[in-house]
Amino acid sequence: MSTSPDPPSTPSTQQTDVQPLLTNARACREWDWIVRQVGLERALEALRHLGYRKPYPLNAARRLGLQIPAVLAKEPEMPQKPPPIPPEIQQRLDALANKLKRNSS
């Protein structure tokens, strides 16, 4: 009679812990877009079936038959600061603020 424990079960050949290879901000934007289009489960399933190809978002999109929009290749523009207030306008604003302070006292 053997008292040794059962052998550990062999891991499945299917990858279950696959993650996208996000090497830069563009890849992150592309992956986010793919997930919004098809959902996380389908996107991860596409990564699992890439075969020898690396799990880049572009490869997942191709597997899903999606065309990634070109606009995702560009960095989003940062909001621009408003132009400085010209000195003569600032002086008028300060004068009005002082006048309001005096009248409210």
Image (cartoon, rainbow, N blue to C red):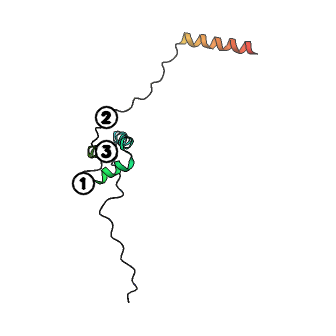
Q: In this view, does 45 lie above or below 38?
A: below
Residue named by callout 3: 57
Q: Which of marks 1 and 2 is nearer the N terminus?
A: 1
How many numbered markers are drawn? Answer: 3
Q: Are marks 3 and 2 in contact (CB under 8 Å)?
A: no
Q: In this view, does 99 lie to the left or right of 82?
A: right
Distance (Cα) linking label 1 and label 3:
14 Å
Q: In this view, does 89 lie above or below 32?
A: above
Q: In which quarter of the image is the C terminus?
A: top right
Residue 89 x, y percent position in the rendering: 56, 11
Three-letter amino acid code of the residue under disc 2: Pro
Residue 100 x, y percent position in the rendering: 69, 13
Seen from the viewer's position, the closer of residues 72 and 60 is 60
Which residue is drawn at the image coordinates 68% and 13% (left, top)?
98
Which residue is drawn at the image coordinates 26% and 44% (left, top)?
62
Which residue is drawn at the image coordinates 50% and 18% (left, top)?
84
Q: Earlier in the sequence, mark 3 or mark 2?
A: 3
Three-letter amino acid code of the residue under disc 3: Pro
Residue 3 x, y percent position in the rendering: 40, 85
Q: Which residue lies furthest to the left in this view?
A: 52
Q: Is residue 87 left or right of residue 73?
A: right
Distance (Cα) linking label 3 and label 2:
12 Å
Sort mark 2 into few (<14), some (14-19) or many (20+) by Cα contacts within 10 Å: few
Q: Do the residues labelled 1 and 3 touch (CB within 8 Å)?
A: no
Residue 31 x, y percent position in the rendering: 35, 43
Residue named by callout 1: 51
Residue named by callout 2: 69
Q: Which residue lies furthest to the bottom in this view?
A: 1
Q: Earlier in the sequence, mark 1 or mark 3?
A: 1
Q: Do the residues labelled 1 and 2 touch (CB within 8 Å)?
A: no
Three-letter amino acid code of the residue under disc 1: Gly
Helix, strand or loop for disc 1: loop
